[in-house]
Amino acid sequence: MSTITIPISGELEEFIKSEIKAGTSETKVHVVRYALKRLQEERAIARLQEAEQDIKEGRVFKGNLRALLKKIK
């Protein structure tokens, strides 16, 4: 596990403190890790939704994957 240092606005710092004070998070680290995990999940969901839309609109490849890859390269 690595450690990073990032500057944050006073507004975000107050939000983090309020989360801890409210008991919804135990530590600053927990708040930040939770936020990053949520962002990661949101991005994954967005990619799945895009893929579903591609399928609905027929933007898909069908057939032998190896043969398709040869055509793309």
Image (tube, rainbow, N blue to C red):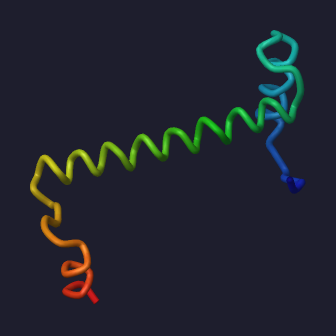
The extreme left residue here reads 58
Pick whichever, 34 or 68, lies toward us.
Answer: 68
The extreme top residue here reads 22
At which x and y percent is residue 56? Answer: 13, 47
Which residue is depicted at the point 49% across and 46% down?
Answer: 43
At which x and y percent is residue 17? Answer: 86, 23
At which x and y percent is residue 41? Answer: 53, 39
Report which quarter residue 39 is drawn in.
top right
* Picture layout, residue 44 above or below residue 2: above
Which residue is depicted at the point 75% across and 38% down?
Answer: 33
Pick whichever, 21 or 42, lies toward us.
Answer: 42
Q: Quadrant of the C terminus?
A: bottom left
* Picture layout, residue 47 above or below residue 16: below
Pick whichever, 62 or 51, lies toward us.
Answer: 62
Q: How many marks?
A: 0
Which residue is depicted at the point 87% across and 13% down?
Answer: 21
At which x and y percent is residue 46? Answer: 40, 44
57 sits to left or right of 1: left
Which residue is depicted at the point 24% across and 87% down?
Answer: 70
Pick whichever, 11 or 22, lies toward us.
Answer: 22
